[in-house]
């Protein structure tokens, strides 16, 4: 997912180019905006954490680009491509190093496991919307 900060700052196209250049195939994609209810459901795993309210507020602050990507070892490869959550610690050339402003406004979300990738893909896309 390309987060509201990156969309707002005009980086969505460049991020998509980086993803495709990284060898990923986009099998589903949509430009949308999360409601408070949807953002809360998507990030429910963090509900007990002190930053949950701020996370939901941030994720509803503007449009996002949701996508399902394919590649061999996609989750692991995407985590390498996006870099560390803290852009100050992200490797040079990673998406977060290039486009993120802070830990909170870190430009992109990437699934942390194949199981979560499936859950998150199903959150945004029906089978009809996938290619």
Image (cartoon, helix red, strand yellow):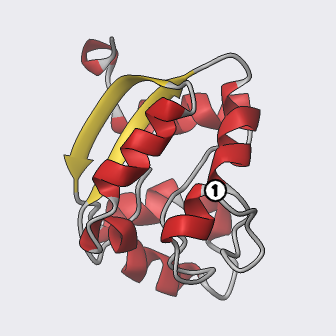
Say which quarter of the image contains residue 57.
bottom left
Is 93 left or right of 5, judged from the image as shown? right
Write the residue at 70% across / 58% down.
83
- Image quadrant occupied by the C terminus: top left
| Residue 88 pos. (x, y %) | 71, 80
**Residue at point 52% right, 26% down?**
24
Quadrant hosting residue 23? top right
Q: Dot 1 lies on which element?
A: loop
Q: Residues within 10 Å of mark 1 (few under 14, many from 20)?
A: many
Is 23 left or right of 26, judged from the image as shown? right
Residue at the location (57% across, 79% down)?
Answer: 52
Estimate the x, y position of residue 46 in percent, counting from the top left. Answer: 65, 68
Residue position for label 1: 94
Query: Looking at the image, is 40 positioned above or below residue 5?
Result: above
Residue closer to the observer: 51 or 41: 51
Number of on-image labels: 1
Place of residue 115 in the rendered image (x, y in percent of width and height, measured from the top left): 69, 30
Pinpoint residue 26: horizontal percent, then vertical percent.
Answer: 40, 25
**Is 94 on the left or on the right of 107, as rendered?**
right
């Amino acid at each position: 997912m390309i987060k509201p900060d990156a969309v707002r700052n005009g980086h969505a196209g460049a991020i998509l180019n980086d993803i495709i250049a990284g060898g990923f195939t986009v099998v589903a994609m949509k430009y949308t905006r999360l409601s408070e209810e949807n953002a809360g459901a998507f990030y429910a795993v963090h509900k007990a954490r002190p930053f949950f309210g701020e996370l939901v507020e941030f994720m509803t602050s503007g449009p996002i680009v949701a996508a399902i990507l394919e590649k061999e070892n996609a989750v692991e490869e995407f985590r390498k491509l996006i870099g560390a959550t803290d852009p100050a610690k992200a490797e040079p050339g990673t998406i977060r190093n290039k486009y993120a402003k802070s830990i909170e406004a870190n430009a992109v979300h990437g699934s942390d496991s194949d199981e979560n990738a499936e859950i998150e893909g199903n959150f945004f896309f029906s089978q009809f919307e996938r290619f």
